[in-house]
């Protein structure tokens, strides 16, 4: 197991260019098998989730390899419609392959991906969307058998705007003759990016970013070269790192138009933000002011993937902050670690009440998911003394060379191995 060792108390200053988005690349990798032709994803970040997804594609017969920052996917050898069980459990995003395998083979077998630290992560909305397209589904002890022989275009309604379910059904319908209309879809920017990628492949999809997506099925799709969008959560995490240390940083290659909920929160806490189309600069006050309330919501509301980082910086803000986690049922698992560092966090169900303290103190803490691990590191940057974040390999799922980005901004973070 490896860990991050953080020596706190240094202001973050300087500039950094943000990586491209894990949550755009993963569904795009699933969409790449909708054709037999090669796809190249340019400027792809080196992340363990992406390499796991590559392993799954290889087990389905594709060839996948990274050359520098170019991820090359050749689905010509694709033979399998059965998702390998051991890998499906390793990465939840394998469920995105359900829609594209059905589109290719009109049948698919996947195992229930199972939950994770932040919640049960059911896939009922994915399955409901596919059933509305005529897919016949039966569950045999956690193995989902899908028969898509009678799939047809038509209306689909989601009871909740699920990101993954929206993406899955977009891919399942891309090659379905006729018009499929998806209602009450998720509006996350990564869905807009998936639509852009699919249309680059020759699909005819519109509406991503709104409540309704229209898919006019095409006969076939082609390979393409594509650069995924920048990562708004990595950008927000670095802004939080600067904010808690009283720093001043400028980020380049930011999807600024997709960051307004976060930017408003940083401003509410007393940060001066200068935003341009693809850059964001943050100048933090000596001490942050508590935000009155932060409610996580589907996009364009405040992103759940930034909740724990904002909770981290609220621990030192002047005043009391209230955080309500509306998206996942168990996303306060790091509160105990913050309190071990001297914070004053009270949890009641989906609500956290965070009374700002004057100081945090370094401690040995444990990452339980990738955003929580990053948030613990953010807290460690402002803590007196040394913080060790164990299980740091979880952070590598979504953050490329996380310690390099922090050190480039003046932090003192090193990677250590713990036996
Ligand atoms: C995507 O997960 C992201 N992952 C998550 O990022 C992100 O937190 C989430 O969207 C919300 O923005 C990827 O894109 C790979 P959902 P996803 O379906 O698709 C419930 C990170 O840290 N739900 O919108 O799984 C679900 O349990 C990760 O990068 C059902 O009940 O999110 C959750 O409570 C974490 N039934 C809520 O909906 C379903 O069939 C939102 O889930 C599907 C979801």
Image: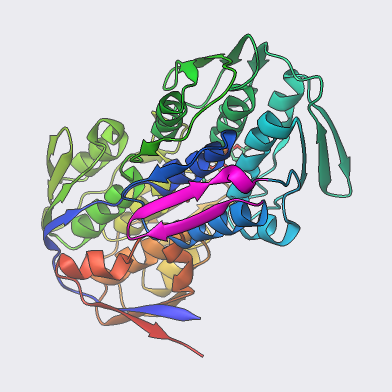
Judge from the rendering whether residue 146 lies leftward or rightward of residue 329; answer left or right.
right
Residue 256: percent from the left, percent from the top? 23, 35
Q: In this view, does 92 lie to the left or right of 282?
A: right
The picture quadrant where one finds residue 376 is bottom left
Where is residue 75 drawn, in percent x and y? 57, 44
Residue sitting at x 21%, y 77%: 412
The residue nearer to you, when weighing 147 against 244, is 147
Q: Can residue 93 be seen in this view?
A: yes
> Which image quadrant is residue 3 in?
bottom left
Residue 343 sits above or below residue 224 on the image = below
Q: Nearer the viewer, residue 301 or 35?
A: 35
Q: In this view, does 382 lie above or below 58?
A: below
Q: Does the magenta stretch include residue 63?
A: yes
**Magenta region includes residue 90:** no
Identify the residue shown where x is 26% and y is 54%.
240
Which residues are the magenta region? 61-78
Where ligand 1 lies, by image quadrant? top right
Q: Is residue 351 visible?
A: no
Q: Is residue 314 above or below residue 154?
A: below
**Image coloring type:** rainbow
* Horizontal side of residue 32 vs 271, given as left or right: right
């Amino acid at each position: 197991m490896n860990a991050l060792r953080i020596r706190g108390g240094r202001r973050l200053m300087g500039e950094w260019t943000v990586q491209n988005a894990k949550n755009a690349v993963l569904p795009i990798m699933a969409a790449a098998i909708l054709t037999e032709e090669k796809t190249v994803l340019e400027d792809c970040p080196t992340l363990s989730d992406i390499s796991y997804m590559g392993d799954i594609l290889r087990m389905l017969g594709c060839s996948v390899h990274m050359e520098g920052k170019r991820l090359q996917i050749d689905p010509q050898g694709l033979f399998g419609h059965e998702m390998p069980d051991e890998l499906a459990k390793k990465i939840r995003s394998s469920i995105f392959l359900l829609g594209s395998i059905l589109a290719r083979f009109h049948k698919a077998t996947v195992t229930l991906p199972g939950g994770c630290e932040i919640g049960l992560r059911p896939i009922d909305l994915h399955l409901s969307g596919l059933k509305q397209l005529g897919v016949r589904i039966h569950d045999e002890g956690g193995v989902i058998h899908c028969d898509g022989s009678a799939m047809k275009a038509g209306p689909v309604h989601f009871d909740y705007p699920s990101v993954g379910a929206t993406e899955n059904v977009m891919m399942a319908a891309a090659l379905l003759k006729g018009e499929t209309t998806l209602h009450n879809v998720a509006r996350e920017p990564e869905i807009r990016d998936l639509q852009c990628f699919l249309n680059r492949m020759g699909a005819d999809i519109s509406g991503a970013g709104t409540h309704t997506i229209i898919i006019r099925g095409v006969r076939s799709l082609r390979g393409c070269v594509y650069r995924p969008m920048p990562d708004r959560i990595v950008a927000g995490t670095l802004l939080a790192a600067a904010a808690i240390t009283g720093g001043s940083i400028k980020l380049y290659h930011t999807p600024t138009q997709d960051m307004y909920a976060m930017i408003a929160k940083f401003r509410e806490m007393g940060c001066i933000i200068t935003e341009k189309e693809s850059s964001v600069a943050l100048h933090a006050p000596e001490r942050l002011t508590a935000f009155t309330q932060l409610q996580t919501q589907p996009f364009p509301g405040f992103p759940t993937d930034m909740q724990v980082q904002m909770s981290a910086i609220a621990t030192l803000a002047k005043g009391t902050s209230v955080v309500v986690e509306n998206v996942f049922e168990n996303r306060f698992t790091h509160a105990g670690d913050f309190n071990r560092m001297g914070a004053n966090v009270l949890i009641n169900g989906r609500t956290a009440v965070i009374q700002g303290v004057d100081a945090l103190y370094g401690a040995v803490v444990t990452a339980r998911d990738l955003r929580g691990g990053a948030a613990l590191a953010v807290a460690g940057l402002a803590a007196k003394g040394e913080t060790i974040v164990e299980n740091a390999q979880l952070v590598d799922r979504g953050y490329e060379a996380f310690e390099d980005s922090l050190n480039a901004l003046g932090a003192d973070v090193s990677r250590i191995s713990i036996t």
